[in-house]
Image: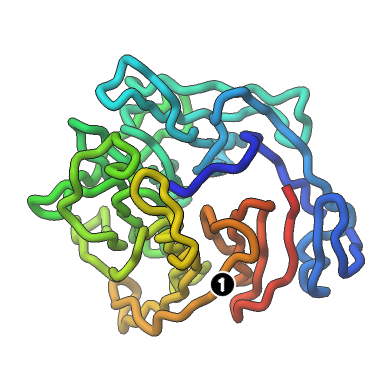
């Protein structure tokens, strides 16, 4: 888990303006292509805010319920063995109108996702959200399927790699074939809510239909955010090795987005190859990475959201 933003706010980006190639209040445009993405009248609207770090990661929108699901940072809780807890919240109502939204922090005993963090809408036909749980000192993390409707129940579909429990799964992405890519850094151990690791900082691919799981790439300081393009041919992975044990910072460590080609002959499976540096932040470290249907790449960073095309050329920034 990368350090959270300085303030804990949930934003709706109401996309739609014609901007000069310079910083404005909320947007910086570096390319005419960015103006095409933003549309006629772009604005950033504050939705809910909280004194606690409730709005940290996740950010999964479910179109069937018009709801936004968000996970918290680690919060103090003396009732747990580690003294920490993480919450999953759902934001409902008119997401273009802050006065009409409602935030419900879900009952962890109902959904059962242990230290929830990253999520990704699963196949549209499934009606579920694939969610990562990091695990606790006594319970393993892994992958869950969450029902996006009350009572928001969830089912764990993966909890280990063979005989080894995962370290603390962090982020997740799903390809068109329904295969799940997820990262598994040792951050939970660093933060004191997971046991000593028994696996490297790796990224896995899991096929819920067959039960097949395999390691697809390693060699990270802290494997973190995961994204995948629309046709499933390119996987983006963030390495936040800049953040070490007990939140120590090594500025010579990676805080980098890497791109990988999915090399396969069929519609699923395949190897990750042709690893290449896609982007390195000008400020802070990247928090998560996602793509749109045109292949553009979006990543959270301390100053907001940066957008690139598939060639790694920066198009612009949404300033938060």
Residue beneath the point at 42% across and 76% down: 260
Mark 1 — residue? 279
Residue 318 visible, this orientation: yes
Is residue 213 or residue 316 the one in the foreground? 316
Side of 121 relative to 282 (left or right): left
User: Furthest residue to the top?
Assistant: 79
Q: Quadrant of residue 130?
A: top left
Q: Quadrant of residue 192?
A: top left
Side of 269 relative to 67 (left or right): left
Q: Is residue 231 above or below residue 10?
A: below
Is residue 129 or residue 297 the one in the foreground? 297
| Circle 1 Cα neighbour tier, 10 Å, few/some/many (<14 / 14–19 / ≥20) | some
Is residue 142 or residue 231 the one in the foreground? 142
Q: Is residue 199 above or below residue 195?
A: below
Residue beneath the point at 22% across and 32% down: 137
Locate residue 265, reporting x and y percent: 31, 84
Residue beneath the point at 38% across and 19% down: 77
Residue beneath the point at 90% across and 63% down: 19
Colour scheme:
rainbow
Side of 20 relative to 79 (left or right): right
Residue 143 visible, this orientation: no
Locate residue 55, reporting x and y percent: 57, 34
Mark 1: which secondary structure? strand
């Amino acid at each position: 888990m990368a350090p959270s933003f300085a303030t804990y706010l949930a934003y709706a980006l109401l996309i739609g303006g014609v901007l000069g190639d310079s910083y404005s209040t909320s947007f910086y445009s570096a390319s005419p292509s960015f103006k095409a993405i933003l549309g006629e009248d772009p604005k950033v609207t504050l939705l809910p805010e909280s004194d606690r770090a409730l709005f940290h990661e996740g950010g999964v929108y479910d179109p069937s319920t018009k709801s936004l699901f968000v996970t918290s940072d680690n919060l103090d809780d003396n009732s747990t063995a580690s003294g920490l807890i993480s919450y999953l919240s759902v934001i409902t109502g008119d997401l273009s109108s802050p006065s009409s939204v409602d935030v419900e922090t879900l009952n962890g005993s109902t959904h059962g996702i242990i230290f929830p963090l990253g999520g990704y809408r699963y196949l549209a036909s499934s009606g579920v959200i694939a969610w990562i749980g990091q695990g606790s000192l006594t319970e393993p993390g892994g992958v869950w399927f969450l029902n996006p409707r009350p009572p928001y129940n969830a089912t764990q579909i993966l909890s280990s790699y063979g005989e080894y429990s995962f370290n603390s799964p962090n982020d997740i992405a799903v390809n068109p074939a329904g295969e799940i890519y997820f990262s598994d850094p040792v951050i939970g151990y660093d933060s004191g809510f997971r046991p000593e690791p028994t696996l490297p900082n790796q990224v896995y691919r899991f096929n819920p239909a067959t039960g097949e799981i395999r390691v697809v790439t390693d060699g990270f300081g802290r494997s973190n955010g995961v994204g995948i393009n629309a046709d499933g041919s390119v996987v983006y992975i963030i390495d936040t090795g800049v953040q070490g044990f007990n939140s120590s910072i090594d500025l010579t460590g990676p805080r980098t987005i890497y791109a990988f080609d999915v090399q396969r002959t069929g519609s699923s499976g395949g190897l990750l190859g042709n690893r290449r540096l896609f982007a390195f932040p000008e400020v802070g470290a990247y928090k998560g990475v996602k793509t749109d249907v045109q292949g553009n790449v979006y990543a959270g960073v301390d100053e907001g959201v940066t957008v690139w095309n598939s060639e790694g050329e920066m198009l612009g920034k949404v300033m938060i």
